[in-house]
Amino acid sequence: MGWAHDVVRVRVPATSANLGPGFDALGLALTLYDEVDAWIRPAGLSIEISGEGADLAEAGEEHLVVRAMRAAFAVTGTQPPGIGLRCVNRIPHGRGLGSSAAAIVAGILAARALAGTDGQVRDGQVRDGQVRDGQVRDGQVRDGQVRDGQVRDGQVGDGAESGPATGALPEDAVFRLATDMEGHPDNVAACLGGGLTIAWTVSGRPNMVRLEPLPSISPVICVAPAPVRTEAARRLLPDLVPHKDAAANAGRSALLIAALTLLPAAGSPGAGWPDGAGALFDATQDWLHQDYRLAAMPETDALVRRLRAEGIAAVVSGAGPSVLALLLGRESLDYRHHLDRLGSIVKKTGIAWHISSLDVERHGARVLSPELLLGS
């Protein structure tokens, strides 16, 4: 196999999953990025990390980006003689902003680019491999399946070249491979596709649709000062929920898609016809997972309740503990008013939340071209 001689840089966005009622289905990409530089070495493994997770540089082969790269190389049928890795991490770890999905996607795309395969991700669009019009089809990984982060039928041992040549990593495998390592598709879908994504699984195969959120949607993240493990938050969920709660969530999930993509800022006059902000607030109400998880995150619970009591569409970001607020109209005076009001509410909690006013990231993960590298 002919390895790439140059450094490959991958840029991956943070993501917020669930968005209230869209549990394990909806994801939104955010303009907060990790960047990974990767290159082929004559031998060995070198990892440099700045920013979040700098203490993980000594993890070696257990580092999540490296594990994702090894899994991707296993699919192509060979491992490089050595790997160099430089990570600039800005996505907070363990805060419900998709840091693990970003690391997995970065590793897979970096490995694919280093292997010189045909299926490059260019400007966030996966071509000739079934991510078209926002939909992933036939996302099957063959000759190198990944389950629970483990490579099978193409095991990776000490990093030496191994396995028969199975050809380039097919485009339609990327989403499946990343989902299998992450365990669920919502953050992975948004990280790969950008914008607003709906993800679902059929017979063990993940699928996704990408939608374009309204330009007026302005996400604000309140990053919690301490992490919570996703596994711990998920263990709090019950096996059964009341039928009326499931029905209410189904309706609000459908409304949320409309509020994020269709509804204008001003609605029709009269009772029962809310404007876009009112519909967005109603649409972010959840009965399926937030209340159960918030018992373990009292500060998050208090902030979500305070913000919603003031009419701000606030939800738990992913599994928490960060909070996502969805405001409208960044260029309007109302936006500044709502942002100031949000900041005042956060300050009154006495908790060291970090507020970041972001945009919706609309391109998704990218292998940066040489021209973009020169301008970065």
Image (spheres, grey):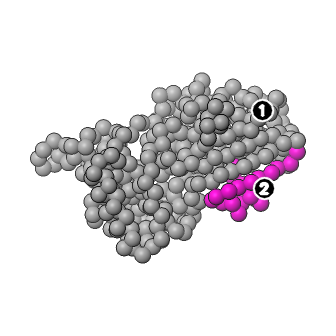
The residues tagged by marks 2 and 1 sit, at their Cα atoms, a distance apart of 22 Å
Q: Quadrant of residue 289?
A: bottom left
CB contact under 8 Å: marks 2 and 1: no
Q: Tell me what residue is drawn at x 70 percent, y 55 percent.
A: 49
Taking the image as drawn, is residue 178 in sight?
A: no
Q: Residue furthest left?
A: 270
Q: Is residue 1 magenta?
A: no
Name the residue nearer the viewer: 169 or 270: 270
Secondary element at image label 1:
loop
Q: Nearer the viewer, residue 58 or 73?
A: 58
The answer to whether 51 appears left or right of 22 in the picture is right
SS category of the residue bearing label 2: helix
Question: Residue 308 location in percent, x, y?
Answer: 31, 62
Position in image of residue 324 (x %, y %): 42, 57
Read off the residue under disc 2. Answer: 60
Label 2 or label 1, whichever comes before in sequence order: 1
Q: Callout 1 environment at 10 Å: few (<14), some (14 to 19), or many (20+)?
A: some
The residue sitting at the top extreme is 128
Q: Point out the stretch of residues depicted in magenta.
A: 43-65
**Location of residue 189 with respect to 116 vertically, above or below:** below
Q: Quadrant of residue 117?
A: top right
Q: Which residue matches tag 1?
A: 4
Q: Nearer the viewer, residue 189 or 364?
A: 364
Give coordinates of residue 112: x percent, y percent. 70, 35
Q: Residue at x 67, y 46 (%)?
A: 36
Residue 62 in magenta stretch: yes
Front position among marks 2 and 1: 1
Q: Which mark is residue 252?
A: none
Point 45% across, 50% down: residue: 358
